[in-house]
Amino acid sequence: MNRRELLLAGASTVAAAAVAYPRNAALAQAPKEVTIGVIYPMSGASAQVGIDARHAFETALDIINNDHALDLVAAKGAGLTALGGAKVRLVFADHQADPQKGRAEAERLITQEKVSAIIGCYQSSVSATVSAVTERYGVPFLCADSSSPSLQKRGMKFFFRPAAQDEMFSAAMFDFFDAQKKKGKKIDTVALFFEDTIFGVDSSNTQRKLANDRGYKIAADIKYKTNSPSLTAEVQQLKSADADVLMPSSYTTDAMLLVKTTAELGYKPKNLVAQASGFSEQVTYDAVGDKLKGAITRASFSLDLAAKRPFIAKVNEMFKARSNRDLNDNTSRQFMGMLLLAEAIDRAGSLEGPKVRDAIAATDIPGTSTIMPWSRVKYGADGQNADASPVLLQYVGNKFVTIFPSDVAIADAIWPMNG
């Protein structure tokens, strides 16, 4: 080979190496794991919520990090393929239902654990504080289950919520009332009963407006202190009002105390339609389920949908193997939120906050690729998924059945709730 041929061959080798290098370098530099922060109440009055949430997130982690033959977002392939098969690692933090502890934990996760995103937080008051921290640091916050409408109205760029919020949930409740009235059922008055944090106050504001707009009389409008040691005075007011529908917005311990107090005072609500939360938790029904026959709660999730999407039953089996209970309104949203967050990080192909944020904002996934009855997942400019269709469930025969809307219902509502 002469000198000219040698130079040409060398140049070709260098060119080939240059073409191959970016891909090889990218694979070599791909992270081995992606860290996501999870902030929930792991101790205190809401500890069971945190325990169940951990089971939901770990079920999602199994699906993300391992290859599963499920027609579900993030189920195909092991790990995040755009990041060289990197595995997701979760770092759990306990906010103890205290917004200031949530703030401190969020800062620790961001500055010390170097998380790529944070998911949380059950209590809306904590989600409000934590998302303010993530916004300041430019780290995405996925609001898995907090449902206060005000959370999406703060002009934040790093806040996203795939599930419905309480304006959407409450509208479904009043749509249901309207439909029942057309069937000849008596629904003229409602009683609002709500705890005094952002969750209860936002819920009551929405329900108050809907009742007035749709011609329902508010027979009682009662705010109480969350984790109150007694609800006797409040229940006496509810009993005197005797509304056609009691509409509580309460966390778990308050929900149980409300039900126990109504029984003690001989008050049997004609109907109870709850803003989920404590009325969606298995621990509530384990404790006072015998007094909640026929109770209705709004929800994001219906296990009945497994008849149309068999993979939902498989996911529920995976969750139940860890938790010894079925997916519910809260755990389904937590599970689905983690899958959607991981899918967006994979699509971003990056751990940088702004790039992950842009990938989340660009999400457009059909509802049939989720375990939820949603039509799709697509975030608006405010970070809210407007296509997260709610359902109503009724507690019948020691389980929940879907009663609304009609296109997913498997049974008619028992109205009044005691038959």
Image: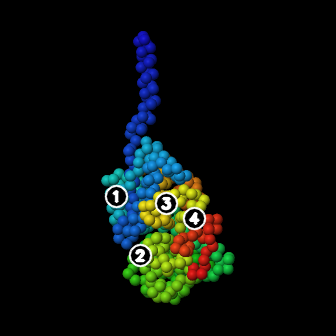
Classify mark 1: helix, strand or loop: helix
Q: Residue at x 49, y 64 (%)?
A: 327
User: x, y percentage for residue 372?
Assistant: 55, 60
Colour pattern: rainbow
Closer mark to the observer between disc 4 and disc 3: 3
Distance between mark 3 and mark 2 Cα atoms: 27 Å
Q: Earlier in the sequence, mark 1 or mark 4?
A: 1
* Front tag of 1 and 4: 4
Q: On the image, numbered disc 2 is attached to which residue?
A: 253
Q: Would residue 359 be visible to someone looking at this image?
A: no
Q: Which residue is mark 1?
A: 107
Residue 263, relative to residue 122: is it above or below? below
Which dot marks residue 317? 3
| Lower position in the chain sequence, tag 2 or tag 1 | 1
Mark 4 Cα shell of 10 Å, populated few (<14), some (14-19), many (≥20): some
Task: Determine the secondary structure under disc 4.
Answer: helix
* Amino acid at the residue labelled 3: Glu
Q: Residues within 10 Å of mark 3 (few under 14, many from 20)?
A: some
Q: In front: mark 2 or mark 4?
A: 4
Residue at disc 3, secondary structure: helix
Answer whether labels 2 and 1 touch (C-beta < 8 Å). no
Going from N to C along the chain, the mark reached first, 3 or 2, is: 2
- Label drawn at residue 304: 4
Q: Residue at x 40, y 68 (%)?
A: 48
Instruction: Find numbered disc 2 in the image and state the secondary structure of the residue it sits on.
Output: helix
